[in-house]
Every structure is written in C-alpha cells, then in structure tokens.
Amino acid sequence: MEDFTVLPAGDGEPEVAVAASAVARAAELLALAAELVDGSADGVIRARIEALMEAKGAEPGPAADWMITSVRALATEMDAVLAYEGICVDRGLAAYWRDPAWRPGRMGQ
C-alpha cells in the first residue's frame, strides 16, 4: 500500500465540512468504479468512458485516462482522510453481502 499525506486545503481554497459517512460512501463507490474498470479485460468499460468523454467534447483517450486515474486517486484520498482522522464507517456494500459471515479476502472468496 502506498503512503499518502493528507494536505490542508490550498491557499485561498475554501474548506468544507462533510459528514464522514458521505466521504465513506463516496470513497467506496469510487473504489468500486475503479475495480469495474480494472476488471474489464475486454475493454468494454473503457470504451464506454471514452465514448462519454468524446460526447462531452474531450479527446477520448487522454480524458478517459484522466477520469480513471482521478477516480482511483479520489477513492484513495478519501479513505486516507478517514484513516488519518481515525474514523471508521460501515461499508455500504456490507448491507448487500449474501451471507453476513462473508468478507472480502476470506479463503474461497
């Protein structure tokens, strides 16, 4: 795992207060979106992202790279902020696990 430094807002950049649960939900959803892109070996998801970027008037390849990289980075940064503050929030996905004993990373998963 990489080390991340949680930096204060930049000069002149306003800070906002956001509920920890909102940050946690956003981090979890962004991480899932990154996994979706990474898991698409056939490139279908990336092709859809490129099509979206082109529809927005951007150069598809570089804009898709920016979006995918940003999704991963934001998810990691949000997790780091929560960890830095010592905040633990239940994962939203946990409510949909098939078996309450099932957890990511367990044997056979």
Image (cartoon, rainbow, N blue to C red):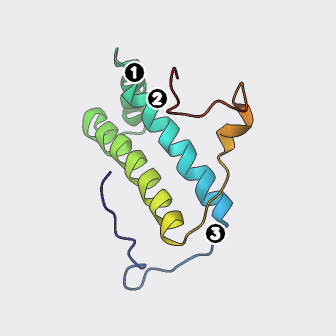
Query: Which mark is on residue 18?
Result: 3
- Residue occupying the point 60% across, 66% down: 87
Q: CA distance from mark 1 to mark 3?
A: 32 Å
2 or 3: tag closer to the N-terminus = 3
Position of residue 5 relative to residue 76, above or below, is: below
Task: Tell me the crowding category of disc 1: few under 14, some 14 to 19, or many 20 or more residues within 10 angstroms, Cα based.
Answer: few
- Residue 58 x, y percent position in the rendering: 33, 40
Q: Are marks 1 and 2 in contact (CB under 8 Å)?
A: yes
Task: Tell me the crowding category of disc 2: few under 14, some 14 to 19, or many 20 or more residues within 10 angstroms, Cα based.
Answer: few
- Residue 23 x, y percent position in the rendering: 59, 59
- Name which residue type carries label 2: Leu
Helix, strand or loop at label 2? It is helix
To which residue does mark 1 refer? 40
- Residue occupying the point 42% across, 39% down: 56
- Residue occupying the point 38% across, 52% down: 73
- Name which residue type carries label 3: Val
- Residue occupying the point 49% across, 59% down: 78
- Residue 89 x, y percent position in the rendering: 65, 57
To which residue does mark 2 refer? 36
